[in-house]
Image (tube, rainbow, N blue to C red):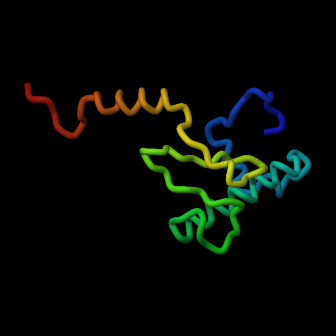
Amino acid sequence: MPIYPSWTGADHADDLQYIFAKPFTTPIAYRPKDRDVSKYMIAYWTNFARTGDPNNGDSRVPTPWLPYSTENQEYLEITHKIDLQSMKQRMRTEFVQFWAQSYQNLPSASKPEPY
């Protein structure tokens, strides 16, 4: 968002304004690169909704969004300049490992404990 300080990242639900084309409906509040982000997100999300694959569909995408795997932990870094270098790996691995291990150690809610 143009109004946020440069050190901030994306907040919860920030993607919604881009998916629903707000940079195009209120252009004064957004920069051209925000409209690029919106265009890319709309293309990926529309393809996914239609085909189950963000890369395949009627909407052209700037680069393939590779499926996530536990081995490589791929993700697409969505910016106004998406290319082959936008596919990244292992985002915040230490946090993912912490929560994956913590989740496995949680008590099960599906089977009640015997008294």
Seen from the viewer's position, the closer of residues 7 and 63 is: 63
Q: Is residue 71 above or below residue 63?
A: above
Residue 106 image point, x, y percent? 29, 29
Q: Is residue 105 left or right of residue 36?
A: left
| Count of marks placed on residues | 0
Residue 103 image point, x, y percent? 34, 32
> Residue shown at 60%/44% (left/top)?
88
Residue reaching furthest to the left: 115
Q: Classify residue 104 by image quadrant.
A: top left
> Residue shown at 74%/47% (left/top)?
79
Seen from the viewer's position, the closer of residues 77 and 13 is: 77
Residue reaching furthest to the right: 28
Residue reaching furthest to the bottom: 58
Q: Is residue 102 left or right of residue 21?
A: left
Point out the image quarter for the N terminus: top right
Q: Is residue 90 left or right of residue 9?
A: left
Q: Classify residue 105 by image quadrant.
A: top left
Q: Is residue 53 above or below residue 98?
A: below
Point out the image quarter for the C terminus: top left
Q: Classify residue 58 by image quadrant.
A: bottom right
> Residue shown at 38%/33% (left/top)?
100
Seen from the viewer's position, the closer of residues 57 and 15 is: 57
> Residue shown at 81%/54% (left/top)?
35
Residue 90 image point, x, y percent? 53, 38
Q: Is residue 11 above or below residue 33?
A: above
